[in-house]
Image (spheres, grey):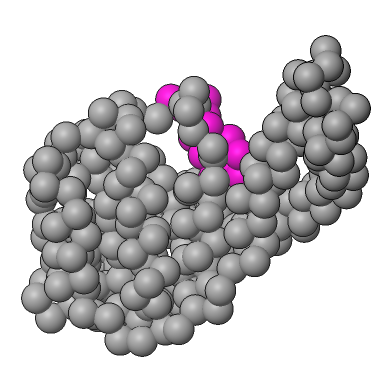
């Protein structure tokens, strides 16, 4: 009888320890998610299938369903935040370009008229008025070039074979070493022209940062995976992006280059959103590279 009671007590104690460990691991998950949200990282994706030996422990079917929902919700929130940022910058850019053009157009017109006047030609005023005209014309051209941030074409999404498409981009840059890992059967739903512009923008930025090697990899989500769709990563061995500017690289007009205009990455993200895709800067670059961009493609 004593042995039976001892066995029962041991079983209760063992179950109690397992229950406490399981609840502690759930608390750890909640903490990780809270920290991610506090850092405005809504793209978290915690695993939902691990054995008892895993670092996060076994999840029961109800907890797996809840974790999957939270993962999906995080991805949806991340997409909405990106979309809201893009729309906000588009509205701001539209207002700024309108107001600047309203201010520069009369200056440009009046200075041009004065330059055409015989009373100005050959006088000391001509050089100053010409400087005003050229400056206002340059500003008008500068502003006009940014209108493409608010006047994007609609996406013509088709079934795009990925490997042949990437090979056409590769042919444009013969001086770069390429490491391509894309299944021959891989396809994505995308606009070929927009995707070409996106990849060229990313590669151009990499080359300007001193990159000698470009790596492009595509991986389709495994069945029953918590990550939906596929992932296209574009890596380079150029200068790493400093931690203090990582959050700003997709902001329109932001650049760390003296000759940059700061619209390449912002425009690329907008073009991707037209195709129901998102682009982020990976926290950890792919092995052998300094910078990796991740493009999440829909199912």
Vertical placement of 197 versus 282: above or below? below
- At horizontal 21% and vertical 79% (from top left) the residue drawn is 161
**Which residues make up the magenta segment?**
242-255
- At horizontal 42% and vertical 69% (from top left) the residue drawn is 194
**Quarter occupied by residue 120:** top right
The quadrant of the image that shows the N terminus is bottom left
**Quarter occupied by residue 221:** bottom left
Residue 60 visible, this orientation: no
* Magenta stretch contains residue 243: yes
Residue 203, percent from left and from top = 30, 47
Q: Is residue 240 left or right of residue 128?
A: left
Task: Give whichever of 296, 158 is nearer the camera.
Answer: 158
* Magenta stretch contains residue 191: no
Residue 274, percent from left and from top = 53, 72
Residue 249, percent from left and from top = 51, 39
- At horizontal 31% and vertical 26% (from top left) the residue drawn is 239
Residue 148 visible, this orientation: yes
* Outermost residue, top side: 124
């Amino acid at each position: 009888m004593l042995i039976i009671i001892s066995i029962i007590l041991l079983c209760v104690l063992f179950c109690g320890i397992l229950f406490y460990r399981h609840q502690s691991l759930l608390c750890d998950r909640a903490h990780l998610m809270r920290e991610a949200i506090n850092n405005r990282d809504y793209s978290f994706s915690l695993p939902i299938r691990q054995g008892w030996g895993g670092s996060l422990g076994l999840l029961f079917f109800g907890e797996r369903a809840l974790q999957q929902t939270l993962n999906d919700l995080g991805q949806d929130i991340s997409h909405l935040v990106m979309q809201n940022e893009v729309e906000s910058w588009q509205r701001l850019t539209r207002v700024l370009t309108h107001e600047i053009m309203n201010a520069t157009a009369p200056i440009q017109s009046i200075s041009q008229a004065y330059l055409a006047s015989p009373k100005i030609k050959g006088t000391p005023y001509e050089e100053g008025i010409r400087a005003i005209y050229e400056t206002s014309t340059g500003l008008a051209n500068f502003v006009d070039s940014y209108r493409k941030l608010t006047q994007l074409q609609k996406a013509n999404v088709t079934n795009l074979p990925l490997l042949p498409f990437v090979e056409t981009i590769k042919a444009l840059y013969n001086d770069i070493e390429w490491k391509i890992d894309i299944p021959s059967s891989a396809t994505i739903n995308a606009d070929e022209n927009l995707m070409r512009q996106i990849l060229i923008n990313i590669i151009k930025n990499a080359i300007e940062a001193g990159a000698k090697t470009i790596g492009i990899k595509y991986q389709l989500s495994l069945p029953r995976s918590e990550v939906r769709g596929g992932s296209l990563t574009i890596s380079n061995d150029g200068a790493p992006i400093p931690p203090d500017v990582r959050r700003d690289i997709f902001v329109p007009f932001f650049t760390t280059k003296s000759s940059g205009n700061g619209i390449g990455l912002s425009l690329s993200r907008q073009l991707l959103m037209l195709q129901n895709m998102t682009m982020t800067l990976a926290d950890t670059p792919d092995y052998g590279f300094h910078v990796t961009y991740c493009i999440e493609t829909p199912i």
